[in-house]
Image (cartoon, coloured by chain):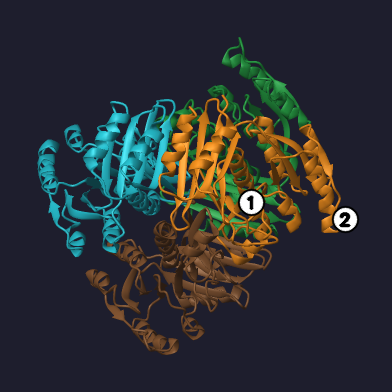
Chain colours: A orange, B cyan, C green, D brown
Amino acid sequence: MKEYRILIDTTDDKGLVYKISKVLYEHNLNIEKNSEFVDEEEKKFFMRTVVTGEFDQEKLIFDMKKITPLNTSIKISHNSKKDIVLLATNESHVLGDLLIRYFDGELNANIKAVISNHDELRDLVEKFDLPFHHINADELSREDHEVQVKEVIDSYCPDLIVLAKYMRILTPSFVVSYPQKVLNIHHSFLPAFIGANPYKQAHHRGVKIIGATAHYVTDDLDEGPIISQDIVRVDHSYSWQEMRRDGRNVEKVVLANALQLLLEDRVFIHGNKTVIL
Amino acid sequence: MKEYRILIDTTDDKGLVYKISKVLYEHNLNIEKNSEFVDEEEKKFFMRTVVTGEFDQEKLIFDMKKITPLNTSIKISHNSKKDIVLLATNESHVLGDLLIRYFDGELNANIKAVISNHDELRDLVEKFDLPFHHINADELSREDHEVQVKEVIDSYCPDLIVLAKYMRILTPSFVVSYPQKVLNIHHSFLPAFIGANPYKQAHHRGVKIIGATAHYVTDDLDEGPIISQDIVRVDHSYSWQEMRRDGRNVEKVVLANALQLLLEDRVFIHGNKTVIL
Amino acid sequence: MKEYRILIDTTDDKGLVYKISKVLYEHNLNIEKNSEFVDEEEKKFFMRTVVTGEFDQEKLIFDMKKITPLNTSIKISHNSKKDIVLLATNESHVLGDLLIRYFDGELNANIKAVISNHDELRDLVEKFDLPFHHINADELSREDHEVQVKEVIDSYCPDLIVLAKYMRILTPSFVVSYPQKVLNIHHSFLPAFIGANPYKQAHHRGVKIIGATAHYVTDDLDEGPIISQDIVRVDHSYSWQEMRRDGRNVEKVVLANALQLLLEDRVFIHGNKTVIL
Amino acid sequence: MKEYRILIDTTDDKGLVYKISKVLYEHNLNIEKNSEFVDEEEKKFFMRTVVTGEFDQEKLIFDMKKITPLNTSIKISHNSKKDIVLLATNESHVLGDLLIRYFDGELNANIKAVISNHDELRDLVEKFDLPFHHINADELSREDHEVQVKEVIDSYCPDLIVLAKYMRILTPSFVVSYPQKVLNIHHSFLPAFIGANPYKQAHHRGVKIIGATAHYVTDDLDEGPIISQDIVRVDHSYSWQEMRRDGRNVEKVVLANALQLLLEDRVFIHGNKTVIL
């Protein structure tokens, strides 16, 4: 059955729940799920409502605008499949996990294509009858490489871009062209071990727990809003390669969980944080 | 600042959020926090709203009754301290943990007294200048012992009774006199290892994870609605005593978390489950 | 580099570490890793030693037998790939996860074939160029079906048989033909929710944590020695299908971890428990 | 029964297990527990053996020295109670937790005294009939204050000094006077959120998991060898004070676990890491 998700993000104000639910009621919508969060410090209001029923979206937005503060953002989406493009480099564990979930029908999404700066993953991707684009970065400036990558991405007009262990730094100009659309998995428990080789860093520091972090990509490397994190225990007997082996299980699950949240339109960006309703 | 918590538990119905928030709005209340849960299968609606402002409670309930289904339960509480009575036997770890939290001012509660069927814990309790009642169970029938226990409990009119490792089975008649008021900590990951010596049972079964469960007490031993659970990892090298040692850390934290939820009026009982908003 | 794993399982006795390490020393072996466990209650001794160097296996076992109690079991294996056969029914998440790990080269094993009582998974398995055997169970007695399954299994002489969500009960006669060779993943936190539909059972009970358990298969359904367990948190808002969705991530990782331990010859069976060195 | 713990820390060398266990055998000792770890990269060997029986310690060490590399460190301790001194500032949760564990007889230790730079905790400490020393730091240089603290510490000749939320930075000269004897609990998941107000930092960063870390104190603030870590999940709805509230449960348990390991002589320092056998 067709569900609509209405996401409202605004300044906190008296009676917002009443006023908003009144509009939904007047539009004769059934509320299946409703969640709000108020950041009292920053006076921000977030509301996610799942509704069923037929309605005029423009009229609804018009009526909402009338009763909410000026800066209100209103997004309406529905539970149809989102189009996603995956970027990877040469590690297959995260990409493979997504492909299996896709094959399972676990993802409410269409994987339109996989793009990589290497060719190793072609065989894996083509097993699942998906387009694979190898865009070689050798002898190209970062900018020139990204031009080609963007061209391919844009040809698919994806709703989301998922970096499935894409081991290249993105330029601000790339990031800015896909606002709130790029999801990354970092193989550490951010903000610990930012940057290269987090498992080697973790091994060197002698931590007893390692983890992974899924986050939106912003200009600041590894500094974007965190969506999901998880951990696994290690001990002195682990080599950094064994940390990586166990850490990869966490990477897979954390990215899959974060993607699931995005596909359900459950994530608001709030400054450099996320609100998940 | 004085906050009120309004807990509404009813049959799901169209427009409930709108109608309820309308009443709150008309009573000129500020909604600080608001959460709902709809059990779509069982068509049940749960809503917890934290409000500030002055209002006429009876009028509010009267107005709410008008716009909600007949079977609606409406509870209004505020964030003042609740009175609790603790029952224990002779293990001091959970009781001691609660006493320290109480001393810390971490619990929004008044511990009115501790009752035990043994005398060992008197010294600990009296360190914290709290009344300790030793009610010996020897040569008494379960019923006769409970009569004495109830007498002491009732003399304090507690809002909650917390079984801090009270190792006696309660009769249905005891349980029924304190509906939704008795909180217990069971030293296993329910429903695993119901009954006596769960750590010995866990050791015997060779599990790799043990846990603890905080639940409401009902007639069915270890079958009441679960409020909170947590776990800790063990391995083949653990004796059952070592499992108990590590498990006790979980018992303490799980009970404290569950008590915290009850003190914040965040727990609804829904059949044999809990809804925590 | 070729490593040998020497697993000794015997009655505890004075000087065993000295006597055993003396034999290893006299055989001029380098000890890379060494772990022991003594079950003091049951007076059992377990030792796993990883060695490098060339040696005469029969001579080593002969010398070991001389200095250890009569009932001593000595196993010597090396770090070459083990042959495994997978049994599945129609769920693809666990099987797919193993196939991706296999494709990654993460498993030190050869997957020789996949056997299923349904045909749905053929497409997935054949993507990875592995033999798929559909052995229909309709209109067959359990025994007759198992005869055909055993025939196929035995044609591959596997070191291990992995039940990757094989949803059929095995007869004692099947189990007894593959002693300590059959690994199963159960989709609950055993011993909780034994039997069918554990996620439905968990949802019905209202637990706050669900899990999965990898164990050796014995005659007793869901009662075999536990190798690995893990959990994930849920709450009242989860339908049983959502519990299953998140639980599947745990199933995958728990089975992969247990398989990893078996491939490294790190698991001893000790009564109905495991000792993992 | 009296147990001895023999900790050997040396350069890896062929036959060490054999040679060491031979000496133990010749001294007629029963090995109750035995664990080794070899750091293959750094060619280091660590062995912890728990033995029972009567023996001549000097002779044992003499014999061990003969068969081990020159740089070998050999420590022999037994399972009698260790003397510890606690330092705190004004938070009572960690200190109170240790006092309750002490009262429970859970710690195999004598708490000789508590030292604080404030007087608030006197009442709590004196409930447990322990000496409390208030050493005011106002108008004193860090050095001068530490002189007084050291004087009190040294009057108790403790085996261990436990910083139970002691919120002052220690000078190198203080740290160097108690090598491998000072245990600290840091209220973050190190290396994340080093320094002041980690809960505020965590809240600001929007992490989904917070934690605590118990570590040896070295000159480098928050950089000492990590002994134990644990975590707890949070979400967008947590204020930093709520993160602190839940984080405190982790602080208590992590510190207690680390202390337990130290009291059992299970921790080796290996560069800036720990090896726990």
Look at the picture and state if A99 lies above or below C169.
below
Indicate which disc residue D6 carries. none
Horizontally, is D127 left or right of A244 in the view?
Answer: left
Q: How many marks?
A: 2
Look at the picture and state if A87 lies above or below C221.
below
Q: Quadrant of residue B213?
A: top left
> Which residue is identified by label 2?
A138
Residue located 20% across and 63% down the image: B128
* Residue A188 shows in this picture: yes
- Quarter of the picture containing the N terminus of chain B is bottom left
Q: Residues within 10 Å of mark 2 (few under 14, many from 20)?
A: few
Front in this rendered view, residue B216 or B164: B216
Chain that bears disc 2: A
Horizontally, is C18 left or right of A177 in the view?
Answer: left
Query: Residue D229 placed where, x, y %?
Result: 50, 60
* Residue C55 shows in this picture: no
Query: Residue A187 placed where, x, y %?
Result: 65, 54
Query: Residue C1 placed where, x, y %?
Result: 76, 54
Residue located 41% across and 39% down the image: A18
Secondary structure at numbered mark 2: loop
Query: Residue A166 placed where, x, y %?
Result: 74, 51
Front in this rendered view, residue B115 or B23: B23
Front in this rendered view, residue D159 or B167: B167
Q: Amino acid at mark 1?
A: Tyr
Q: Amino acid at mark 2?
A: Asp
Front in this rendered view, residue C59 or C88: C88
> Which residue is identified by label 1?
A216
Look at the picture and state if B221 lies above or below D144.
above
Q: Residues within 10 Å of mark 1 (few under 14, many from 20)?
A: many
